Amino acid sequence: MHKNASTILLYFIVSYFGYSQEKTVFCDQLDALKMVVKTNHYQPKIVDDSLSTHVFDLFLNSIDEDKRLLTKEDVKQFEKDRFSLDNYIDNNDCSFIDKYAKVLNQRIENSKIIISNLEFETFDYTGKDTLRFKPESQFIYFKNDEAIKRYWSKRLRYNILYTLIENDSVLDHLQKEFKSLESELKPKLIQKEICKLETLQNRLGSVDNFVKESFLNAYLNYHDPNSSFFNASEKEIFENSLSNDQLSFGIITTKNDNGDIIIVHITPGSAAFNNGNFEVNDIIKSLSTTTKTLETYCISNQDVMAFTSNQEHNTITFKIKKQNGALKTIELTKTKTKTEENTVTGFIIDQKSKVGYISIASFYSDLESPNGLGLANDVAKELYKLQKENIEGLIIDLRFNGGGSMKEAADLSGMFINRGPLSILRYNNGETFTIKDVNRGALFTKPIVILVNNYSASASEFFAASMQDYNRAVVVGSTTHGKASAQVILPLDANETLGFSKLTVEKFYRVTGKSHQAQGVVPDIILPNLYDGFNTQEEFTAYALENDSIAGIKNYPKLKPLPIEQLKKYSISRVQNNSNFNSVKKLNQLIIKNHFELDTEYLLTLNNVYNEMSSYKAQWETINAPLENHISNFTIKNTAYTNEVISYNEDKKTINKSILKDLTNDIYVEEAQAILQDLLNLIPLN
């Protein structure tokens, strides 16, 4: 008896010590994070009731974003903490976090049981029930278990109908074989939903870890949306996301809240990047080699990474679903990504005048190079090759360029001006520092057009803004993302055991003193864009840093004003009479109506869902047809150097042919070329 009692006591001490240790780690992380933010953040906020209520909302949203797990009663209980979180943080009291993890885990388990039991329920597809679709902002928490069951019964029926139609577009066949097809698919989709819940339970190792890191991120996101918490693994993945020294497909994936494996990053210069058929947010449906197929039903992202990283899987056939719903099958072979060789390639557009074209995907910097050479150095190499071809102007394409190294952006800017100030950095203590190009002379002095869109951010905005302020280039496209802040990764403790914070530490301003923060760089000439109205820019993100201005530099050596109004007049005339840009506008409205503003009820019948899906697909195909079949009226070709390089490699020839075809079909490159030609006509070269 005494021995058993001692054993129980020992177990209790060990268990309590383990629990206490985990609890202490979170307390230490939160306390350290508070100090790191207070000391280093560009605009640290006071730990008070205002912080408490906003962090509370961010935190709840992060652990149950779609309001599909927690109930109204749960939230009512949690509301007691709304104005107390600041007190917990100040008093280093971390006990509050435990109930969130406990309740969330209970709700996940409860939902798994409810969904599992639906496998034994006969679903009604007569139209007796409808499923309500509404904008995300109108989502509400469930009242009770009965409401949860009703939702999942309807949601699963819709998912079954949608998937059946997606897999087989012949209605007659679906009607005849509906019973057998439905009974075969139903358990798979039920298992997929359960898998999504189990993935949430295992995220970061446990619900407890997920909830704690969600709180740390909520604390940081309240200060600004670009600050976040990293554990050691996340920091390593972030820093190594642009690896260029191994065979790979160059695709980084994650599993989204719908249980889909989606592409979140495509490495510049990689096999996927050069292929041109892959895009961020594509859904991977399956992966196949000659001997194995991996379906992405109910699997983790780690399984996908293991499959693609397998040394025996050098060629894989990817089945992907595009954002417009189209399915594509693409065979891809791994390559060794050499950033300095593959990322930047110059092309020649030949129509009336010969001009150069360079696309820049990111402002990478080769930290392993003794000289720290990166993007700017690579562009300089391509410019040398283009100038040997006697180009009269240059198009620089920054669409979808999310940024990168500010040093590279400054170096690139300096290549196109004589010398002078480029931007003003402002620190949290109010001090400023002017980033300058100190090198006399410019590498390229002829006219430039810069293409941007809603997803051009950070370093790409730095470059576009400096070129615009110096009257050095005509900026064309859509208003950019609006991120004028810089981040650093800081450890939370000296031993780096508590994790890391990616923290916003400074803002940068244009030489005029104005800022594009939360406003973006407004192009000189605006073109219709597929992503207009998606509200993905920084200004639509909660707690984004505000736009402001500081004292600018009065006498910087800007060039004579460009004939923007005349160029704009010519461009508007072309665009208004261009069926392709009209198609872009119509596609944009179709997407907004069916995805962002959808507020309707679906009758849960095969015919109704089929008609809805067919109608959307038909509209898309009709509107998109001119874009699919478009061929620009210019000739695009390689430099002599590129032709020589690809002549020895059949794979490179194939990739190059695909790139040239895509550029020929690109209506934005076509309009940029037309604007550059107008500029050359208005400002003849000496």
Image (cartoon, rainbow, N blue to C red):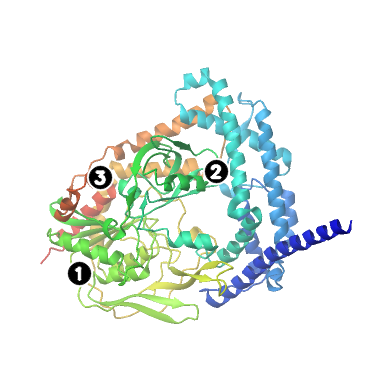
**Residue bearing the label numbered 1:** 443
**Residue bearing the label numbered 2:** 258
- Where is 295 relative to 648, above or below? above
Q: In the rendered structure, find residue 419 and report the number of the disc placed on it.
A: none
- Describe the element under mark 1 as helix, strand or loop: loop
Q: Is residue 344 left or right of residue 116?
A: left
Disc with the residue nearer the chain's start (2 vs 3)? 2
**Residue bearing the label numbered 3:** 651
Disc with the residue nearer the chain's start (2 vs 1)? 2
Q: Position of residue 257 (x, y in %)?
A: 55, 46
Residue at the spot 53% in from the left edge and 68% down from the top edge = 501
From mark 2 to mark 3, how far is it between C-alphas? 36 Å
Q: Quadrant of the C terminus?
A: bottom left
Q: Position of residue 244 (x, y in %)?
A: 35, 58
- Where is 151 relative to 436, above or below? above
Asked if residue 538 shows in the view, the reply is no
- Where is 159 relative to 198, above or below? above
Q: Nearer the viewer, residue 589 or 338?
A: 338
Q: Position of residue 192 (x, y in %)?
A: 57, 38
* The residue positioned farthest toward the left in the image shown: 686
Q: Is residue 567 left or right of residue 281?
A: left
From mark 2 to mark 1, how far is it between C-alphas? 49 Å
